[in-house]
Image (cartoon, rainbow, N blue to C red):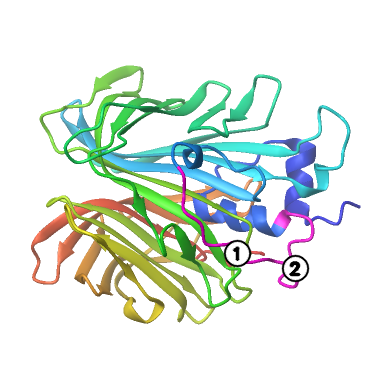
Amino acid sequence: MTGLPPLQDAFLAKGMPRRPGRRQWMAWALAAASGATAGNAFSLPAKALQFPRDHGSHPDLRTEWWYITGHAFAGGRPWGFQVTFFRSRMDAAQTMQSAFAAKQLLFAHAAITDVQGRKLLHDQRVARAGFGVAEASETDTAVRLRDWHLQRQATAPSSTTSTASRYTARVVGEQFGLQLQFDATQPVLLQGQQGLSRKGPLAEQASYYYSEPQLAVSGSIVVEGRTLPIDLGKPARAWMDHEWSEALLAADAVGWDWIGMNLHDGSALTVFRLRRADGSALWAGGSFRGLGQATRVFSDAEVVWRPLRWWSSAHSGARYPVQWEVQTPAGTYTVTAVLDAQELDSSASTGAVYWEGLSDLTHADGRVAGRGYLEMTGYARAMQL
């Protein structure tokens, strides 16, 4: 017995779970880590994030991800896309002497939404760090897992960015491929209190968290063997989140709802909430940054989510709110799924079923505001922490 729940035993023994979602994966990894109990969790200290160092990995903390979502036109059609790399420290393996011990695991998850074809395609990779197979640099964003990678390089500063970045993502999946570049057009957005973001009522329920909104998109998408260049004359924007943590989610949180939205006027909107089993909000937060303005951080009491329309999955039986009214200090918005059927199923290994997909943002009066991604977890079944 390792003292770990069955999920981590499966990680160590089999090495390949199927299609974990970003926040599901965080919850599972935290739950799986040895000694991860509410009694010995500790609060992360407030600190100034340092770049480019904090673009890199933080293996001393339990869980971490680099997450890029966006939308673009290619081949005359609109697409949504997601590329995520995860790192998990496996506490049970830290004292093992074998070079084969899975002390750090790396995951990668990618998906595209074919808006015209009304379908979602997704794929994944996982491996233990080392042996030239998987690695995550500690000095800058450079994450590689077999033939998938995400890498950052510094570019010349512009009038709007003092330390500009270009991210390059490469994904070779069974049904699709991505070769995309994302160029910063704005400064890094520090979430929470200067990069320390609360995720629950207890101080230890927190993460270091920053975003890079309004990324310009170029490159190509490969579908059915056809390479489709990104149409640079059409709207195309991406959003990058980098988050790392040691802490547990609240014990009575069964799931969460989250949006990262690039507004057409150059603003950036983040809103999230954690839910109890009865659907009530356990904790909420987010931020708004207007173009060229300071970031407005939302407190727990300032955010309200109200479902407007539901969609039921014939596959899982889960019922998801695919249209929301979201009230924030920056305004009231409506979030609407571009495609209802953007549910992902990883029940073959991890047991998680969740919804994550391309969505539109409108003002309360119906004016189009922007586009981005909506994520919803815990509707098919509660997270098992």
What main secondary structure does the magenta stretch of the protein show?
Answer: loop
Name the one closer to the observer, 198 or 26: 198
Residue 40, numbered label: 2
Amino acid type at circle 1 is Met
| Image spot of residue 278 (x, y percent) | 50, 82
Count of numbered badges drawn on the protein: 2
Residue 383, numbered label: 1
Residue that sits furthest to the right in the current view: 1
Is 258 included in the stretch rendered in magenta? no
Residue 314, numbered label: none
Name the one closer to the observer, 365 or 121: 365
Please indicate whether residue 340 sits to the left or right of residue 55 in the image: left
What span is colored magenta in the figure? 32-50
Q: Secondary structure at mark 1?
A: loop
Is 41 included in the stretch rendered in magenta? yes
Amino acid type at circle 2 is Asn
Residue 343 in view, yes or no: yes
**Residue, x 53% and y 73% (percent of image)?**
200
| CA separation in Å, label 1 and label 2 | 21 Å
